[in-house]
Amino acid sequence: MKKKSLVIVESPTKAKTIGKILGEDFSVVSSMGHIIDLPQKKLGVEIEKDFAPEYVTLSGRQKVLTELKKEAKGKTAVYVATDPDREGEAIGWQIKERILKDANILRVTFHEITPSAVKEAFKHPREFDTKMVEAQVGRRILDRIMGYFLSPLLWKKIARGLSAGRVQSVALRLIIEREREIQKFVPREYWEMEAELAKGNDKFLAKLDKIDSQKAEIGKKEEADDLCGDIKGKQFVVSEIKKSEKKRYAEPPFITSTMQQDAFNKLRFNANKTMSVAQGLYEGIDIGQDNPVGLITYMRTDSPRVAPEAINEVRSFIARSFGKEYVPEKPNYYKVKKLAQEAHEAIRPTFVSRHPDSLKTFLTPDQHKLYELIYNRFLASQMKPALYAVTSVTINAGKYQFNATGSTLTFSGFTAAYNRNGEDEETEKDKAKKNVIPALAKGDILELLRLLPSQHFTKPAGRYSDSSLIKALEEDGVGRPSTYAPIIYTLILRDYVRRIKGYLNPTELGFMVCDLLVEYFPKIIDIKFTAAMEEELDEIEEGTLGRLKVLQDFYTPFKASLDFAQANIKKEVITTDEVCAKCGKPMIIKWGRRGKFLSCSGFPECKNSKSITTGVKCPQEGCGGELIERRSVRGFFYGCSNFPKCRFTARTLPESKE
Ligand SMILES: [Zn+2]
Ligand SMILES: [Zn+2]
């Protein structure tokens, strides 16, 4: 036995990267994720005994645990190097508790898996942070209590097999409330009027702003036509010119939420995909040298802080690649949110000298795109602001006042590395940039080339995308770096929400589940209440609040609602216009393990049931079946009515225009 120390991490890739870095004196093994958790088939929390959790070895994980115990024997030291956040701390703590309770097992943390960071971390192992573990255990118990008691209520009222999570339900409520706003929205027509003007050969656009010093408001086509007739005869005179310089500052380097938002806006990655690609980059990639290496820092974080060494490195890199004029006098500093603490650093490349282009052959296309995004955003965050020369012109034509604004980039600053806007969001500023205002002087008379009236309608707030939902959750204080992606994933898996063309559409089932929760548990799925619970969990980690207090604050109102709901909830029946072919009674909608279907209301006397077809033909040639909604453990999909003869499946309807 040559090995001296054992290191336990949670993933095989990470084990491989760290093993190479630490060398022969260490044996690095993976726990393959969670080994210990609350039991799967019962509550596992003794409510009367101060909510004592009953942790067990997960079924199927006994072998891994035995293996770890065997490995730990005879080692001079055992280190737990799971991820540097609450969950990592808790996974590690439980492994320690189960392996060798009395052995000296120490915790090692690092935010990047690079030789220098890992070696440095192993020089400073520490005891486990029990406050951090407490916060995670508290969260787990809260979630378990809610899920365990709510599921049977959903089964009683809607269908078996449904479940509801604590934070997911709040997210679902946001999505449902937005959908209702959209349904209720009545669009209002309005018109805008632009004038294409010229001075000599130079043309530009100006917009009608005021009529008789009042804000111009045009409601209908007839009004716009009348205005066109009246404006045409007027003389256009420049009455005011304002020139100014505008600065646009770079955004902070990525934290989990902003990375997920930008990856959606720019790359169309959903939150789950972003996190799994980022994990690969973090855990280590073989980049053609002898060792795999972590290319980015830890991807679950809500702190924009950057290590001083990394700031020095990026500043000299910017000076070399873009020029000294792009480097601000002092490093850009970004404020850390009060509650930011799950981890301690922004998401950034571990070495700025590893340019995305140089790694292209070692990365998958998705890894390359995300790495490039993280890389450029980090560079930009330490660059000077972009400068624009802005010209605003006021033009009078009789009682009509037009405005024109144009801006030109005079210094690219951080935009040389990164531009925030996604392809789909052209801002007013972008439009203004394209409108080049010629040199004008006060009193100049302009030629009116044409008037451009345009019709518009007010729009309701859009449906949430992964990006805007994460933004909303973060602003409301509900999500945490480790929860944004699982929240959306779970809602889709349960078919409460479907992602169509990138937007989150609630299903009928989603409406029913949400309405039940809002009716019977208004306080528990209140955003402010949930945000307060999240804050209390943070306070456990700070050591200012005990776990028991937090659990009681939750359980008291929850139990009151629960008792009422258990006594009052009744089965909800959704009747359809369809009539049973066997007995003539109306058919009702039911949800089963494989999804929604029609069942005879005469059940159990009449056992007739049928699938609900979408009316869309199966695209498989010669099949002639129709597509029907189905559910599996992997979530919702469309399958063919001729299954199992035809095995066609799709995530979205092939002919759907949505
Ligand atoms: Zn029937
Ligand atoms: Zn088919």
Image (cartoon, rainbow, N blue to C red):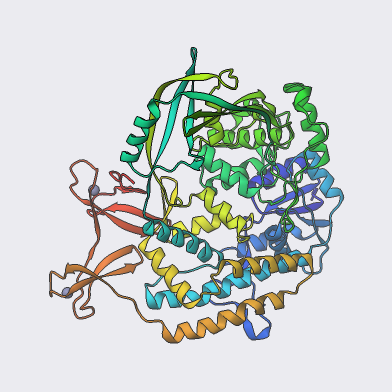
User: Can residue 279 be seen here?
Assistant: yes
Q: Is residue 548 above or below residue 293?
A: below
Residue found at the very far right of the displayed protein: 123
- Residue lying at 66% horizontally and 63% vertically, measured from the top left: 66
For residue 584, side relative to residue 62 (left or right)? left
- Residue lying at 87% horizontally and 49% vertically, measured from the top left: 123
- Residue lying at 48% horizontally and 24% vertically, measured from the top left: 236
Residue toward you, 106 or 503: 503
- Residue lying at 81% horizontally and 65% vertically, measured from the top left: 103
For residue 607, side relative to residue 188 (left or right)? left
- Indicate the position of residue 545 as horizontal and vertical percent values: 76, 72
- Indicate the quadrant where residue 325 lies: top right
Q: Is residue 168 above or below residue 236?
A: below
- Indicate the position of residue 397 as horizontal and vertical percent values: 47, 28
- Indicate the position of residue 408 as horizontal and vertical percent values: 61, 24
User: Can residue 364 be seen here?
Assistant: no
For residue 638, side relative to residue 34 (left or right)? left
Q: Is residue 531 above or below residue 519?
A: above
Q: Is residue 35 above or below residue 322?
A: below
- What number of labels is visible? 0
Residue toward you, 205 or 127: 205
Residue toward you, 618 or 488: 488
- Indicate the position of residue 83 as horizontal and vertical percent values: 70, 53
